[in-house]
């Protein structure tokens, strides 16, 4: 199995008058797992289907490895896809399902059986070959679907919302399995999901899509810590979005005025003036008035508090707006009506353009 890179060069796809994908370019390195993430209708499935050759581009070029596959049909691309529905043949047993693609390729019976058995072993299903799909759990069916794609030793493996039919616990387990397999076999995997936590858990890099274009591309850390725009800030986890004023200090840093408080952060090329500020819930520190209060704090009143076992969630009223905060300190709780002071941690506060 030799993993291949993928390259999109100014790719668009129109259905009638509407553009599902609009002039999108990206590169996926061989041997990495990259997720296409975004809300329903943003174009991620169409992008995945264009990699597979199940949709043809309206314009632009697609390269897989060194080959321009823009006009190459699906059957001749070195790509396998695991579908949301698994699409297992109900009348074939597990071994026949896994070996089906090899049989179609004209491989010998012995070779097909040996490879199918090896693929089943890879996904932890050795000994399940004789069963029918209906005799398997959802997670096991999912593994059969993965084995069936793996057995073809594709240069690129695609997953279209692979876990959406599974319950929450199994989803977590299966996503870890997919990641482990991808790393062990050094596969190139492109994974589509609308679940931000799932994307962050499995990916080397994430391509966030919104309305047919790329909103931002980066590592999970980059997208969470330094979102490029309000959409990404809001989509990659919870974020308070408030208004502030930026004053550049030097080449790199800016002073950000937020009501009665300020913080110094990287200005990331933004000009002086109004900006939107994304504040992660864990970046707000809450101080009781009878405790030692650091400098540069600002006042707030607790509106709501909820105990979640491992953490507290607060809604706070302040001069810069209502703020949502999460604190791991469940021993010193603040109650609705309490006056408190807030400070901002450096991590988790980002200035983004005000539009
Ligand atoms: P979801 O998570 O709901 O599957 P998505 O991000 O995968 O959404 P796509 O399936 O890529 O989005 O669809 C993008 C846009 O293209 C949508 O507006 C959709 O209605 C449209 N679209 C997709 N396939 C077709 C088609 N075969 N014919 C017409 N329009 C289509």
Image: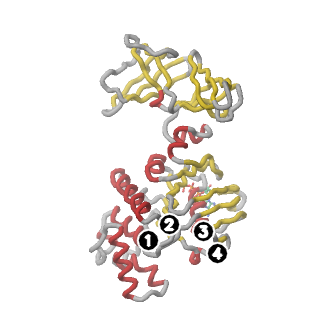
Q: Earlier in the sequence, mark 1 or mark 4?
A: 4
| Picture layout, residue 46 above or below residue 260 | below
**Quarter holding the C terminus?**
top right
Colour pattern: secondary structure
Q: Earlier in the sequence, mark 2 or mark 1?
A: 1
Please give the label number shown on residue 72: 4
Q: Earlier in the sequence, mark 2 or mark 4?
A: 4
Question: How far across and down, in percent of the image, does residue 354 sit?
Answer: 67, 32
| Residue at the disc numbered 2 | 157
Marks 2 and 4, how far apart at CA: 17 Å
Q: Nearer the viewer, residue 312 or 185?
A: 185
Q: Residues within 10 Å of mark 1 (few under 14, many from 20)?
A: many
228 relative to 133 in the view: left or right: right
Q: Residues within 10 Å of mark 4 (few under 14, many from 20)?
A: some
Residue drawn at (39%, 77%) of the image: 97
Which of discs 2 and 3 lies nearer the camera? The answer is 3
| Residue at the disc numbered 3 | 65
Local SS, label 1: helix
């Amino acid at each position: 199995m030799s993993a291949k890179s993928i390259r999109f060069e100014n790719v668009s796809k129109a259905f009638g008058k509407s553009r599902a994908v609009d002039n999108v370019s990206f590169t996926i390195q061989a041997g990495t797992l990259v997720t296409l993430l975004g809300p329903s209708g943003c174009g991620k499935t169409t992008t995945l289907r264009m990699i597979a050759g199940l949709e043809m581009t309206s314009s632009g070029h697609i390269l897989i490895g060194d080959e321009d596959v823009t006009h190459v049909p699906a059957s001749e691309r070195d790509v396998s896809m695991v579908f949301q529905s698994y699409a297992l043949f109900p009348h074939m047993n597990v071994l026949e399902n896994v070996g089906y693609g090899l049989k179609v390729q004209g491989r010998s019976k012995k070779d097909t059986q040996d490879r199918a058995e090896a693929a089943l072993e890879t996904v932890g299903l050795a000994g399940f070959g004789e069963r029918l799909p209906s005799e398997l759990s959802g997670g096991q069916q999912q593994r059969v679907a993965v084995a069936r794609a793996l057995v073809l030793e594709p240069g690129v493996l695609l997953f279209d919302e692979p876990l959406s039919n599974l319950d929450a616990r199994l989803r977590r387990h299966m996503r870890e399995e997919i990641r482990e397999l991808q790393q062990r076999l050094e596969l190139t995997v492109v994974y589509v999901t609308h679940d931000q936590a799932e994307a962050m858990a499995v990916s080397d890099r994430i391509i966030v899509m919104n309305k047919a274009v790329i909103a931002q591309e980066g590592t999970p850390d980059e997208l969470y810590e330094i979102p490029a725009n309000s959409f990404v800030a809001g989509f990659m986890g919870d974020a308070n979005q408030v208004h502030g004023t930026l004053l550049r200090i030097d080449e790199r840093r800016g002073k950000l005025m937020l009501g009665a408080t300020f913080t110094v952060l990287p200005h990331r090329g933004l000009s002086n003036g109004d900006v939107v500020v994304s504040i992660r819930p864990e970046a707000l520190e809450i101080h009781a008035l009878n405790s030692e209060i650091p400098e540069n704090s600002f006042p707030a009143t607790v509106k709501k508090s909820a105990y979640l076992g491992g953490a507290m969630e607060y809604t706070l009223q302040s001069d810069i707006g209502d703020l949502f905060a999460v604190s791991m300190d469940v021993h010193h709780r603040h109650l609705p009506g309490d006056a408190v002071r807030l400070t901002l941690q450096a991590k988790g506060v980002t200035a983004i353009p005000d539009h």
